[in-house]
Amino acid sequence: MKLSYNWLSSYLKTDLPVSVLVETLTSIGLEVESTEYKENIKGGLEGIYIGEVLSCEKHPEADRLSLTSVSLGELGEFPIVCGAPNVRAGQKVLVATVGATLYPQSGEALTIKKSKIRGAASEGMICAEDELQLGSSHDGIIVLDPQAVAGQKAAEYLNSLGGYKGKKIETDLLIEIGLTPNRSDATSHWGVAFDLHAALSLLHPGKSELIRPVIHSFEQSNQKLALQIQVEDHLLCPRYSGVCLTGVKIQESPEWLKNRLIAIGLQPINNVVDLSNFILHESGQPLHCFDYDKIKEKKIIVGLAEKGKIFKSLDGQDRMLKGFELCIMDAQREPMCLAGVYGGLDSGVSAETQNLFIESAHFNAKSIRKTSMSHLLRTDAASCFEKGSDPNLTVFALERFVTLLQEICPAQVASDWFDVYPNPIAQVNLEIRLDRVRSVTGYPISNEEILQVLRLLDMDPQFVSDAVCQVKIPTNKTDVLREIDVIEEILRIYGFNRFVTSTEIKFNQNQLKKVSSHKVKSKTAEWLSAMGSMECMNLSLSKSIYYTKDGFSSDALVYINNTSNQNLDIMRPDLLFGMLETLIHNQNRQQSDLSLFEFGKSYHKIDDNQFKEIEHLCLIKTGLQQQVSWIEKNPKSVEYYHLKREIVSLFEKWGIEIESSQFKKETIENDPLWAYGLSYQRGRDVILKLGRIHPSVCFDMGIKTAVFFADIQWATVLQIISKKKTIYQPLPKFPMVRRDLALVLEKSITFESISQIAHKVLKNNLLQLNLFDVYENEEQLGLNKKSCAISFQIQDPQKTLKDQEIDQWMQELMHKYEKELGAIIRK
């Protein structure tokens, strides 16, 4: 949500720096995502001063140019060549000095420089309206009041007069906050100002003042505009308020109103529409304006329109209604408006409108969300309603609208103030245990501080006993329904950063009865990060085209009706393509050496009524192993075995020997996603797949480097871990011995075969087995032969090993390798 600091300041008066307000907004749960200074006149007239034309003569070399001498007060006198037909000696004018940059309404920006025009020196420019963005006229220069003081800054002078033709030169700070769905109370400038004032009153007492929007008392004119209102469904529309106005003149909005809307990215239309948008962003209450004379039979029906009925919306499109949309209809049940979402073309305000009906209602949040999403109409009004509007704000918003409208055009109230509200929504009453507040926070907040926060939040705390008080929850806080919600509100305003962090570390040593998925996931993420990988988090939505073209059965895909992005039409059946999209996103930004991991779910359709979610941990690598540096000028690219080494090490961290006999290992074949790889099974479950992604898949995604991927079934990992016992083993007291062997083997023999024999012979005495070199040379070793250099780290936990024992084991190892693997021992 975008906030204008100038607009916010009209409700919250404070001398505190903007940086303090931004920090406070984030601390109270309205996280500031970005700030940007914005000028209603680009450049803010910087370098533009009041000048007095001392002399004016015709240019001897050009009939349409004049040679002037202009005084800028203490800044000095300057020669300026001027082409305006209305320049005269004695005038007060606006002068752009050397170095100033002008941003005319058409054309490119212009920086003023010293120059010679037809042989005459010119050190500045006397400006017209359009050259300063103050208007559209280019008929001549702007001539100011003779009382203007030469040398004064143009912006200061014009603003002291209320602006140029009502247009002030303003610099505003645009604050964008990440508004969470539960903050229905902060969907407006007033709501944010109220929250901010509450926090500032605690953090900086006396430094802020809250100014409530003003409304006037109204007199009804003698002319009555009759109107009948019928609400058919009070669940979908609990409250419907409105009023009719006459004598309305549709015209351009005043500058102050246009500036407010432009600051937050809205385009001004006319005074009535602009004012309704202003009220929405001021108070959080959407309004809708109908042309009274277009309402058939002067009757409004609020209810469900007929299924299949065509509704012509303001954007000129014909939309077929589906029967669940709440509509504002006329006496013939023709939809004039999708309630709370979008207006109709045939009942909207036009230049000929003289009579208005203004609607201010409270609609059911779920109904508005369903209508908005179904018709792809994501309007500001719908956004407010679907978070939950304040049912007790409707009449105030109407009165505020009429108050401001009467200030800018001669509108008169011409009907009763309609308010259909058969079942008033009462404030929620909750009991708050003061000791519970301190228990949850772990901090000794005093009773007086708790009560002060509650009063600042307009919750009217009243004691029902010494330790319990009752509060009334304002109806704009739709998410505050329990005691713990109120405690969160107290902490939010009191300030989480005010809690003192203890210098002591206290903990209880206990044994969990079951494995904590969260803790295992956290430790795993820490370890992967330490190994140089970065965590990513992708959408659970994906594109079906990724899978249907690669032979994936579309019957297993979980299709969704995504009205926001029709390309993302399925729930992802794996994490691969999301991670590939992350790779290409980074590579397009010159980040090509990547090692990423992601925890996430895949989604699968079993049949029409059954779906399955599977948790995964996936790793992906591409590019170089490490950055180019003075010590590593030609680093190698990532290969399959780099990924496998990391995966095996990760399983070891979990206490799982993935290369042991309890897992069945198979080569991945005839899979369009994989060029090559391995699959590890435990019973029927595939616990791990790793290998290289097929180059054709990468090519289709726009990735030119080799990509290596691993997919781990997280639930199976947790299941195995849960059955493992943690056993403490003291550090060894006896030394470790290393012995090496070089074996000449057939190329087809795997390292696993070598490892199995080593474990059979050395049993628990084998501490570590490492393949540290592979050598191939047909001339020296023979056809299809390879030499593998193996190191054996041997240790007995009970005693110091003797050379005789170790030699005996090594002899047995060599005999086994020769007999079972056909190895030749290189000596």
Image (spheres, rainbow, N blue to C red):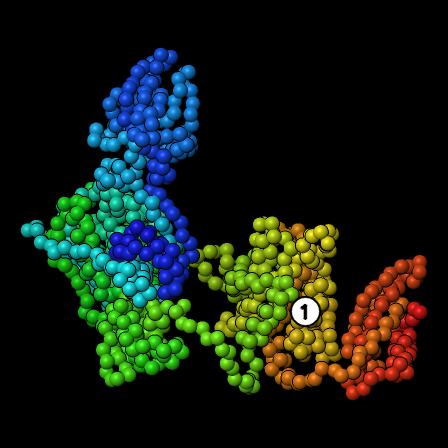
Please name the amino acid that badge 1 sits on: Ile
Residue receiving disc 1: 647
Image check: 224 left or right of 45? left
Image check: 184 left or right of 752? left
Image quarter hosting the N terminus: bottom left
Q: Indicate the position of residue 530 as horizontal and vertical percent values.
A: 62, 66
In this view of the protein, which residue sits in the foreground, 260 or 578?
260
Q: Is residue 54 above or below residue 753?
A: above
Q: Quadrant of residue 580?
A: bottom right
Residues packed near mark 1 inside 10 Å, few (<14), some (14 to 19) or many (20 plus): many
In this view of the protein, which residue sits in the foreground, 785 or 606?
785
Image check: 262 left or right of 827? left
Q: Indicate the position of residue 570 as horizontal and vertical percent values.
A: 51, 62
Q: Quadrant of residue 517?
A: bottom right
Query: At numbered mark 1, what does the secondary structure look like: helix, strand or loop?
Result: helix
Q: Indicate the position of residue 342 as horizontal and vertical percent values.
A: 31, 54
